[in-house]
C-alpha cells in the first residue's frame, strides 16, 4: 500500500470586481461592452421583476414565492456562458436566470400564481422546470448531461441550487454520478447563507461548501457570488471544461439572501438586521454599476433609463399575465398520461359533473 | 370540572409537545426550522427557548437524515418526535421509514422497539405550490409496523399527539394543515391522552354511515347537516382518528346498523384508505349492505396547481349527491 | 407460422432488452452490476458486451441516483431502462419516482414526457435475506402518473417489457423473481409486443372469478386445476398483467358473469391491490355479487425471515379453501 | 469576502506493520502481549468461522451470506477500542467484529440460516442488528451517537460499511449530521475494492475515500486495513476523540475482498485472478503472525494450537446451532407491535389455520 499522504489542492477563491467596483484585470473575463451592458440590464430586470412580484403577492395577486434580492449576479452570471443547446436546471429562486434563458416574465408570474401553464419550459428553451423539492432536480440535471455524453453532443448542463440543498443525499449522489461518468455538468451552489431559518453553520460543518466537491473528485471553486465578472469567469471556464469532455465542476457562489425566504416567511424571528447590514455594501448591482460608470461603459443616466425600461417591461408582463390568468380546472386530468386510461376517463367524468354542479362547465 | 382554553390545532399541538417535553426527559424534537423559527407553521413555537437546543433540534435540510437519526435516538432510548416540513417530503425519508422505523421492533424481536413519532402536515386547501398538498397516508397504511394517526380538530389533535408520543410503537402523525388555524375548540388545560386505534362515532344516525378523517371531517359534517335538515337523511359519522391499525369493529357495527356507507378522503383513489374500508366492509358486513359503498376521494392525478385545487378536493355537495344516490340505490 | 424457443423468464427478459437495444438507439440500460456481471439475476447477461458500456451502464451503488439520472436521460430524449437490484431497494428511490418520474409529463403539460422503465425483481420464495422479498406494487399503484406492469411467465414477460420500453409513459416493471427460472415457455423468435392496460382471461369458467398476477398465478392455476378435477368448480382466471391502469372492464365483465370472486396477491393486505379490486367490484358489479369478494394476500407484517416464508405466501390450499367457502356462502 | 484560497490539509495514510511484518514503533499502539494475542485469536476465529460457514452454505445448511476472507484486521481492529458502553453498528460482512462484540457464533449461524432468532443483538451487547440494505444503518448509528451526546454520556458509536455504501445519499447525509452535531461517531469504511462486481473506480472518482470525509469537515484518515496495529491505532484515536466531545472521524480501511461477494456470486465473471494475487501477500493474518512469531509473543506452535482451538469453537457453535435451528412459523406476527392490534389478531388466526392445514400447528 502506498503510504504517502493524500495531497489535496487548495480551493481557489475568485473575486474580479471588489466591493468598491475595482477590477482585477488579470482575472477579468474578456467581455465586450455590449455583453457587459446586457449583463447589467438582466440584473436590473431581475431586481425589478422581484420587487414587482413581491408587491403583487402582498396585494393577493400572486401565491407564495421566493424573492432573490441581492442574488442577481449569481443568477445571471451562471447562465451567461450557456448556449441554446446547453441546458439549465433552475431552482425555485432562479427566475433571474430563467428570464435570461428565455422564459417570459408573464409565464413566470403564471407559475407563481398557481397556474399550471407557468410550468413547462417554453418552446426552444432547453431547461428543466424548476424544482420545489429541494435538490430533486440535481440528479435529473446530471442525467441530461449523461445523455449528452452518450449522444456525443458537446454541450453542458448548469444546475442551480442552494446551500441547504447540499445536505440532501440525492444531491450528493448527483455529485458522485457526475464525477464517475464525467458528465458535462456545472453545479452552481448559490450559498446565500440561509435555508429558511437555518444558517450555514447549522447546515454544514465546513466553512466553504466548495470542499464538498473535492470530496467527490470534482474540481471546485469558491466565487464571490455578488461579483458578476467572477461569476461569468468561473462559469465560463466550467462550461468549457464540461463541453470538452473534462467532466463536472462545482461552483460555490457566495452571496446573501437579502430578503425573505419566501413571502410566507418572517426573517425577523430568526435573524438580526446586523447580519444583513454589511451585505448592503456588497450589493452586486451597485458594485457593477460603479464599475460600468467609471469605465464609461454606461453613464448614470443610461443606468436610470435602463431601470425605467426594465420597470416598463415588468409592467407589460404583468398586463399580459392578467390577461392570461385564467384557471382551466377542466384540464387537470389531461396531462397525466399520453393517452388517458379508462379509469381516468371515468374519474374525469365524475369531476366534470362536480364542476358542472359549481356552474363551471367548460 | 377542569378548565379549558380555546385553541387552534396549531396551538393544541404545541401544547401537547410542550407537555411531553416537560414531563418526559427522553422526549426530544428534531426537524427543519423547528427551533427559533418555531417551524414553518409555528407548531413548535417557543419550545426551543423553553426546553433548550439539545432537546429541540434544528436539523440540516435532509428528511432521510431526520428520520434516520431519530431512529437511532429511539434505539438509544429517547422518544424523538421528528417533524417533516410537508408530507410531500416524506418521500425523501421513505427508505428510513420503511426499512428501519417500521421494522426495528420486529427485526429485534422487541429488543429495540422504537417509540418515536414522525409528524408532518398533509393535505390541500392552502393554495400551496407543488408537492405541498399531498395526502399519502395509504403508503403508510400499507407499510407493516407503523401506526398512522390523523386528528381532525384541536382537541383530538392534542390528545392523539400525546398518545402517539407515549405509544411504544412508531407513529406517523399526519396533521391536516388546512385545519391548523381554521377554527378554535375548547381544549382541556389538564393533560388529555387519547387511546390510539379507536375511531369515534361523532354523530349517531340510522340511514347511512359516513367514514372519514382529518381535514375531510369538516365537509362531511357540513354535508350531513344539510342532509338532515334539507333531506331528512339521518347520517352516522365516524371519524377514524387512527388509520392504522383501523378500528374495523366500529365501522362494521355502524354499517351493519345502517346498511349503507360512504367513505371520504382526499388521498388518491386507487389503493387508498377508501379501498381498504370497502374491502373490510365487504368481508365483514357484506350481507348487511343495501347498496354499494360509496367512495369519494382525491382523483388518481397529481394534486393540481393551486388555482384548481378547490375543485379537486371533495366538497359537501359531492358528498350530499353521493349519499342521495346511495339512499335510492336499487 | 413463426418459430419459437423455449425460454425461462430471465432469458425472455434478456431477449426483450436485446431487441430494444438493437432496434432503438435511444434505449439504454442503467443499474448496479448489470454490465459484465450481467445483473445479479443475469437478466442483462451479455448485453454490455454486445451494445457497449455507453448503452449498458454500470452504476454506483445509489438507487436514487439510478432513477434520478434515468429521469434526466429520459428528459433528454433517451429511453432508459433502469434496473433496481431488488424491489426492496426502490424505497431509496421513492422520492425520484414519485416526485419526478411520475410527474414530469404532467408538470410540463406533455412537454417533457418520460418514456422510461424501472425494472425490479419483486416477491418472495427464493430464500432470500431481509428486504429481498418485498411486494409493494400497491405503493406504485397509488402513485398518479405511473404505469405498473407485472408479467407472470416468460412469454408475456418478453412482450410486456417490449411494450413498456416503447410506451410513452413511465413504467414500473415488477419482475416475479420466483418465476425467473421456474419454468420454460415457448417464446416467439420474432418480436412480440403486448398491449399495456389489458388483463388476460387465462381460463374461462362460470362459477367464480380468480384475479391475480405475477408469481401468484402459479398457485392460482394449480388450485383451479384441483378445484375443477376434484370438486367440479369451474374457475375463471384473470391475469392482470398491467396493475395500473387496471383493466376494470375485464374484471367487471367476468364477475358480472360468475357472481363470485377471489383476489390473490402476495403484497400486504391493507390498501393492497386486492382492496382496490374489491372496491371496483363493489362500485361496478355490486348487484351481481352472490358472495363477498375473497381476499387472499400477504399479511400486514414484514416479510418473514426465510425459514418461514413458505407459510407466509398464499398457497394453492388456501385458495382452494377460500373458493370452497365462497361457493357455499349464504 | 475573504479571497484567500481555502487550505486543505493532506490526508494521513497509516501503516504500522508493513507487508513483511515489520513494525514502525513510532506509530505502534501501546498494546500488551495479552492484547496482541487476543487480537490474533479473534482474527483466526473470524477466518475459521468464515470458512466453516462457507462449507455449510455449500452443503445447503446455510443461506446466502457474505464471506470476509482477508478482512480480518479491519473487522477486529475497529471494535477493539470499544467498551461495552460504546455501540457498534455492523454491516452484513461484519461477523468478525460481531463475535468480538459478544454475539455468539451459533446466533450468527441462525441469522444467516434464515432464523429470526439470529437478528436481535444479544442481551448486554450494545449493537445494532446489521443492515442488509446498503448504508441504511449509518444514519441510525449517528442517531445513537446524537443520543449519547444529548444524554451527556461519554461513549461513542462505531459504524462499519463498505466502499459501495459511500455512494448512498443516506450515508452522505449521515456524515453531515454527524459533523454538524459533533456526534461521537467513528465511521469505518471498509474499502475492499469491490461492491459486488463494481470496482472502486466505477464507484467513486477519487482515489481515496477518506477525502469524502474532508468534504463534510470530518477528520479523515486512510489506513492499511490489513494491518491490525494500524487499525487499532486509528480507531483508538478516533474513539477517544469522539468520547471527548470532539466529534466524528472517518477511517478508510483499505483492504481487499479475497473471496466471493456473497455465496450467490461468481467473481470469475468480472475480475481477473491477477487482481487478487498481490493481496495474498498482504494477508492480515500472515503479516501479524510473522510479527508475533518474530517478537516471540506467540510461537508457531502456539499459533497452530490457536488455530485448532478456534476450529473447535466453531464446530461447537455449529453443533449448538444445529440444536437450536428450528423454525417457529407461528411466531411471525408476534414482534410487529408492542400489543397485537385486532386486525393482526384476525390475520394471525387465518394464518394459524393455514399452518394447521399443513400439519404445523404449534
Ligand atoms: C425536500 C424538501 N425539504 C424541505 C423543503 C422546504 N424548504 C423550501 S426552501 C427550503 C430552504 C432551502 O434552502 P437553500 O437550499 O439554501 O435554498 P434557498 O432557499 O436559500 O435559495 C426548505 C427547507 C422543500 N421544499 N423540499
Ligand atoms: C440499498 C441496496 N442496494 C443494493 C443492494 C445489493 N447489494 C448487496 S451488497 C452490495 C455491494 C456492497 O458493496 P460495499 O458497500 O462495498 O460492501 P461489501 O459488500 O464490499 O462489503 C449490493 C449492491 C443492497 N443490499 N442494498
Ligand atoms: Mg440558501
Ligand atoms: Mg466493498
Image (cartoon, coloured by chain):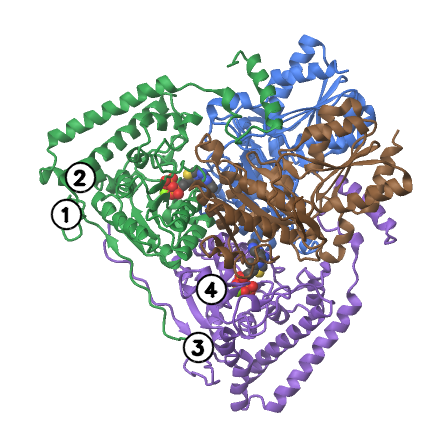
Chain colours: A green, B blue, C brown, D purple
Say above or below: C153 vs A67.
below
Q: In which quarter of the image is the C terminus of chain D?
A: bottom right
Q: At 71% from the left edge and 30% from the top edge, which residue is drawn?
A: C250
Q: Residue A23 carries which label?
A: 1
Q: How far apart are marks 4 and 2 (CA)?
A: 45 Å
**Same chain for the residues at labels 4 and 2, yes or no?**
no
> Mark 4 near mark 2, Cβ–Cβ under 8 Å?
no
Residue A32 in percent (x, y) is at: 15, 41
Which residue is under mark 2? A36
Residue B144 in percent (x, y) is at: 67, 45
Q: Residue D200 carries which label?
A: 4
The front one of B55 and A54 is A54
The front one of C294 and D284 is C294
> What is the crowding at mark 3: few (fewer than 14 residues within 10 Å), some, or many (at least 20)?
many
Name the mark nearer the viewer: 1 or 2: 2
Kindly state the secondary structure of the residue where label 2 is placed. Answer: helix
The reply to whether the residue tagged 2 has its Cβ within 8 angstroms of ligand 1 is no
**Which chain is indicated by disc 1?**
A
- Left or right for D153, reference A141: right
Amino acid at each position: 500500500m502506498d503510504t504517502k499522504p493524500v495531497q489535496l489542492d487548495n480551493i481557489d477563491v475568485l473575486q474580479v470586481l471588489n466591493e468598491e467596483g475595482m477590477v482585477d484585470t488579470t482575472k477579468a473575463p474578456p467581455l465586450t461592452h455590449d455583453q457587459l451592458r446586457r449583463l447589467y440590464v438582466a440584473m436590473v430586470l431581475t431586481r425589478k421583476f422581484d420587487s414587482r412580484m413581491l408587491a403583487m403577492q402582498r396585494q393577493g395577486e400572486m401565491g407564495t414565492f421566493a424573492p432573490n434580492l441581492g442574488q442577481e449576479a449569481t443568477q445571471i452570471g451562471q447562465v451567461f456562458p450557456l448556449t441554446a443547446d446547453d441546458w439549465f436546471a433552475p431552482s425555485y429562486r432562479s427566475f433571474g436566470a430563467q428570464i435570461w434563458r428565455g422564459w417570459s416574465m408573464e409565464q413566470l408570474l403564471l407559475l407563481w400564481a398557481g397556474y399550471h401553464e407557468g410550468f413547462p419550459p417554453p418552446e426552444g428553451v432547453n431547461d428543466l422546470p424548476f424544482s420545489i423539492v429541494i435538490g430533486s432536480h440535481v440528479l435529473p440535471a446530471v442525467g441530461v448531461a449523461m445523455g449528452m455524453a452518450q449522444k456525443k453532443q458537446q454541450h453542458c448542463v448548469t444546475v442551480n441550487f442552494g446551500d441547504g440543498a447540499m445536505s440532501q443525499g440525492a444531491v450528493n449522489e448527483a455529485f458522485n454520478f457526475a464525477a464517475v461518468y464525467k458528465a458535462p455538468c456545472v453545479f452552481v451552489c448559490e450559498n446565500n447563507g440561509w435555508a429558511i431559518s437555518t444558517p450555514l453553520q447549522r447546515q454544514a460543518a465546513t466553512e466553504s461548501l466548495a470542499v464538498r466537491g473535492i470530496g467527490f473528485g470534482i474540481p471546485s471553486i469558491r466565487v464571490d457570488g455578488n461579483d458578476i465578472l467572477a461569476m461569468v469567469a468561473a462559469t465560463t471556464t466550467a462550461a468549457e471544461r464540461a463541453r470538452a469532455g473534462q467532466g463536472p465542476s462545482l461552483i460555490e457562489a457566495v452571496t446573501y439572501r437579502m430578503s425573505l425566504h419566501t413571502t410566507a416567511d418572517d426573517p425577523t424571528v430568526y435573524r438580526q438586521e446586523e447580519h444583513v447590514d454589511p451585505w448592503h455594501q456588497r450589493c452586486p448591482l451597485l458594485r457593477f454599476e460603479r464599475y460600468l460608470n467609471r469605465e464609461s461603459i454606461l453613464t448614470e443616466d443610461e443606468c436610470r433609463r435602463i431601470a425605467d425600461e426594465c420597470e416598463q417591461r415588468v409592467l407589460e408582463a404583468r398586463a399580459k399575465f392578467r390577461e392570461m390568468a385564467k384557471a382551466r380546472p377542466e384540464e387537470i386530468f389531461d396531462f397525466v398520461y399520453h393517452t388517458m386510461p379508462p379509469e381516468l376517463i371515468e374519474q374525469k367524468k365524475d369531476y366534470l359533473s362536480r364542476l358542472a354542479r359549481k356552474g363551471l362547465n367548460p | 370540572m377542569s378548565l379549558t382554553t380555546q385553541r387552534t390545532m396549531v396551538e393544541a399541538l404545541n401544547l401537547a409537545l410542550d407537555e411531553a417535553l416537560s414531563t418526559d426527559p427522553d422526549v426530544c424534537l428534531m426537524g427543519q426550522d423547528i427551533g427559533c423559527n418555531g417551524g414553518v407553521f409555528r407548531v413548535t413555537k417557543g419550545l426551543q427557548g423553553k426546553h433548550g437546543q439539545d432537546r429541540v433540534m434544528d436539523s440540516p435540510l435532509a428528511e432521510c437524515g431526520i428520520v434516520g437519526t431519530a431512529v437511532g435516538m429511539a434505539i438509544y432510548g429517547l422518544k424523538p418526535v421528528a417533524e417533516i416540513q410537508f408530507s410531500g417530503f416524506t418521500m425523501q425519508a421513505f427508505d428510513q421509514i420503511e426499512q428501519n422505523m417500521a421494522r426495528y421492533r420486529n427485526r429485534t424481536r422487541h429488543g429495540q422497539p422504537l417509540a418515536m413519532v414522525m409528524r408532518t402536515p398533509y393535505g390541500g386547501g392552502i393554495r400551496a405550490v407543488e408537492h405541498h398538498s399531498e395526502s399519502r397516508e395509504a403508503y403508510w397504511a400499507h407499510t407493516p409496523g407503523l401506526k398512522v394517526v390523523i386528528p381532525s380538530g384541536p382537541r383530538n389533535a392534542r390528545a392523539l399527539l400525546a398518545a402517539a408520543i407515549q405509544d411504544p410503537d412508531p407513529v406517523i402523525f399526519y396533521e391536516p394543515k388546512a385545519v391548523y388555524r381554521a377554527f378554535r375548540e375548547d381544549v382541556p388545560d389538564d393533560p388529555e391522552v387519547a387511546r390510539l386505534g379507536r375511531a369515534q362515532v361523532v354523530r349517531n344516525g340510522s340511514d347511512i354511515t359516513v367514514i372519514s378523517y382529518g381535514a375531510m371531517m369538516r365537509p362531511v359534517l357540513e354535508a350531513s347537516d344539510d342532509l338532515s335538515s334539507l333531506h331528512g337523511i339521518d347520517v352516522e359519522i365516524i371519524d377514524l382518528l387512527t388509520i392504522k391499525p383501523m378500528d374495523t369493529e366500529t365501522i362494521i357495527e355502524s354499517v351493519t346498523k345502517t346498511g349503507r356507507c360512504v367513505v371520504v378522503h382526499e388521498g388518491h383513489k386507487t389503493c387508498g384508505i377508501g379501498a381498504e374500508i370497502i374491502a373490510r366492509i365487504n368481508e365483514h358486513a357484506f350481507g348487511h349492505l343495501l347498496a354499494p359503498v360509496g367512495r369519494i376521494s382525491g382523483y388518481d392525478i397529481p394534486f393540481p396547481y393551486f388555482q384548481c385545487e378547490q375543485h379537486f378536493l371533495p366538497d359537501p355537495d359531492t358528498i350530499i349527491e353521493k349519499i342521495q344516490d346511495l339512499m335510492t340505490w336499487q
